[in-house]
Each structure stands twice: as C-alpha cells, then as structure tokens.
Image (cartoon, helix red, strand yellow):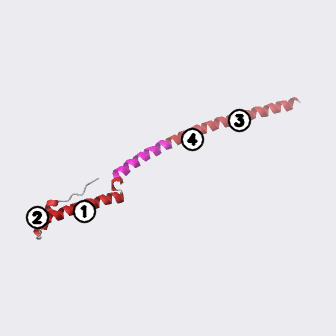
Amino acid sequence: MATLTFDTHEFVKKLKDVGFSEEQAEVITDLQKFTVSNTLEQARHDYELDNLATKRDLKEVEAALRKDIEVLRLNTAKDIAETKADLIRWVVGVGLLQITIIAGLILKLASV
C-alpha cells in the first residue's frame, strides 16, 4: 500500500515565513505529522484499505475464473458425450432383448 508523504521541511519553512518561531513551527509540524499518521491509520482500519483489491488482482481472478469455466465446460461436454454413448448402448441392448423376447413368443405361439 502506498504511503502518504509529508514534507516537514517545507511545512516548517512556511510556518516560519508567516511569523512562527523555529520552535513553534517544529512543534506544529510534529503535531501535524502525528495527526496525519493517525488519520491515515484510522482510515486503514475503518475502510480496511489494506484488503482492497487492485485492478491487477481482479484481472488475475477473472483470468483464473475464465480458465476454470473453460475446463468445466470441456469436462461437461465430455461427460455428456459419455452419458449419451452409455444411453445408446442401453437402448440398443434393450431393443435387442425386446426383439428376442418377441421372436421367442411368436415362435412359442406358432408351435402351439
């Protein structure tokens, strides 16, 4: 996470330019630095700034999800093809069994 920079030398210089003594300017600068640091830390805590996702993070997740979806799509297509083949085998087997049973019944009835 990027840090916030605070130019203390420039701050002290500006305070001295408007009439503050060196000691006053340094005390005010230290207080300002402390306040900025605390404010930033509170914002990090309140808004969980350290846990924010960047655009790069989102693009990486998107790429991984796209890859996972493609793998699932290919696996699903393979599973469907295998299921279709199994179903065709069962239908052909049951059809042959029905033909055999019907032929046997016809032969049985014909011999009576």
**What secondary structure do most residues of the magenta stretch adopt?**
helix
Which quadrant would residue 39 be assigned to in this image? bottom left
Q: Is residue 31 magenta?
A: no
Q: Earlier in the sequence, mark 1 or mark 3?
A: 1
Q: Position of residue 90 (x, y in %)?
A: 66, 36
Left or right: 106 with respect to 88?
right
In three-dimensional space, the C-alpha distance between marks 1 and 3, rounded to whole angstroms, equals 83 Å
Q: Which residues are magenta?
A: 55-73
Q: Nearer the viewer, residue 23 or 19?
A: 23
Residue beneath label 3, please? 94
Residue 24, percent across and down?
A: 14, 66
Residues at marks 1 and 3 touching, judged by CB atoms closer than 8 Å: no
Q: Toward the viewer: 56 or 51?
A: 51
Res. 22 mark: 2
- Label 2: which secondary element: helix
Q: For the residue marked with disc 2, what is the amino acid?
A: Glu
Residue at which label 4 appears = 80
Q: Quadrant of residue 80?
A: top right
